[in-house]
Structure formats: structure tokens, C-alpha cells
Image (cartoon, rainbow, N blue to C red):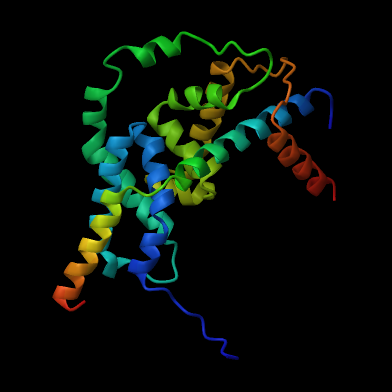
Amino acid sequence: MTDETKPVRERDALIRNHLRRSFEDKAAEEIPGDLMNLIAQLREQDGKDGK
Amino acid sequence: MGSDAVTIMDPKDELVTHLGVLRAFALSLCRNPSMADDLVQETVVKAWKAIHRFEPGTNMRAWLFTILRNTYYSSYVKARREVADVDGILSGQLAVKPEHDGRLAYTDFLKAFEQLPDDQREALTLVGASGFAYHEAAEMCGVATGTIKSRVSRARQRLIELLDLSPEDSMELTDGGTIAVIVAGQNVRRG
């Protein structure tokens, strides 16, 4: 690894890490109640439809 | 037990396990929590109704992301443009580089990421954050693999410009977790 490429690699790794952290933080947020209610409604409808 | 049989999860049960990442992808695209939640709900309804088309054993996350992005580009882009930046906040951010001192703060990164064009933000999210291969992201977006590679490359370059991180800059890594990840990666490569 040359002196020129090391800062670039570190910078790219830092960006990649922030990118993953950003996505994981969003994915870890609590699922909104409306969405869970929707799932429950869909399951209930499936039950009525005999699926 | 002793059974080697592979249990295949009911697709509808599996769908529910992807809600978090589906919402994360929607937030990355919309940059508006309310709109993202509407988008996820619409995606879930479409996927639920079309679940018979999903082939068990294949990549459900990719299938769901494809439905979500198609819904987004067909129904939400215009609406988002109408409500976005009514106060000129984003426009103001575009002209201001973060006042970092050679350090890359996470909050600066988030602001810069939100300023990327839709196609670049999407490509970076799919490949850089969600872990899809270039060819998988290309298939989901309906473009050539080279196009995704180009979008990712331009996105990275744009982030570097927005964050004022030219290769010549001496970047100080201040986040302990980040340093650990980078060091671990270098050790693996050396090994």
C-alpha cells in the first residue's frame, strides 16, 4: 500500500461504514403501528378468504 | 430431530421479516418519513396480493425492493418533487460544505447522502448498504450492470466533493467503531 492510496482507502472505508450504519439505523427503527395493523388486516382477510 | 429437511418459511411470514429493511430502502429513496411509510404500505399490499408469484427459495428482499422502487418511480417521484424543498432548505445545503476540520462526522455524511440524485442514492443504497451485488442491483433497477457501477462511482465521487474529502486531504478518523472496522478489514486482507 503506497502513501497515496492509503488515505483514499481509508476515506472509502469510512464512507462505506457510514453508509451501512445509516441503512442499519433506519432498518432498526421501530416498525410503525399503521404498518403492523395493515399486516394484521391482510392476515385477517386471508383468514376470511380461506387462504 | 435428525432431519436434514430444509424448512421453507411461509412467504407471507418471510415478507414480515423484511419490513425493517424495506422501510430503510424507502427512507433512502423518499427522504421523507411520512411518504416512505405510505410507500412501504403500498408495497406490502402489492406484494401480499402477488405473493403467489414469488418463488420460494429465491431472494425475497430483492423481489420486495423491486416492487417498492417501481412503485416509487411510478407514483411518488412527482409528489415528492412537489413537496420537497418548499423552504429552500435543500438548496441552501447544496451550497454549503460541512465545516469539518479534516474529520468526517456522521451527520455531515447523512446531509451529503441526501443531496445525491435519486439514481445515485439508490445505487449506493443497494450495493453499498444493502449488500446486493452489482448485477443484482442492475436487475432490480432494469439497467445494465455497468450503469450501476457508474452510478455508484459517481455517487462516491459526489460524496467526496460534498464532504470536501479530496484524496490530498488528511482525514482524521475520530469514530472508534469506524477505526475498528477499518483496522479489522485491513487485518483480514493481510491474512
Which sits in the foreground, B169 or B14? B14
Rendered location of residue B89, percent (x, y): 36, 14
Q: In this view, does A33 lie to the left or right of B164?
A: left
Please count the marks in the image: 0
Q: In this view, does B80 lie to the left or right of B97?
A: left
Q: Is residue A10 left or right of residue A35?
A: right
Q: What's the residue at 14%, 74% (across, down)?
A: A48
Rendered location of residue B187, percent (x, y): 82, 45
Q: What's the residue at 52%, 44% (across, down)?
A: A24
Which sits in the foreground, A31 or B43? A31
Can I make out residue B49 in this image?
no
Q: What's the residue at 24%, 36% (across, down)?
A: B76
Rendered location of residue B71, percent (x, y): 26, 45
Can I make out residue B140 in this image?
yes
Q: In this view, does B133 lie to the left or right of A12?
A: left
Vertical side of B112 occupied by A25: above or below: below
Rendered location of residue A9, percent (x, y): 72, 31
Residue B117: image quadrant is top left
Vertical side of B7 occupied by B128: above or below: above
Residue A47: image quadrant is bottom left
Q: What's the residue at 38%, 38% (across, down)?
A: B27
Furthest residue toward bottom: B2
Vertical side of B98 occupied by A1: above or below: below
Q: In which quarter of the image is the N terminus of chain B?
A: bottom right
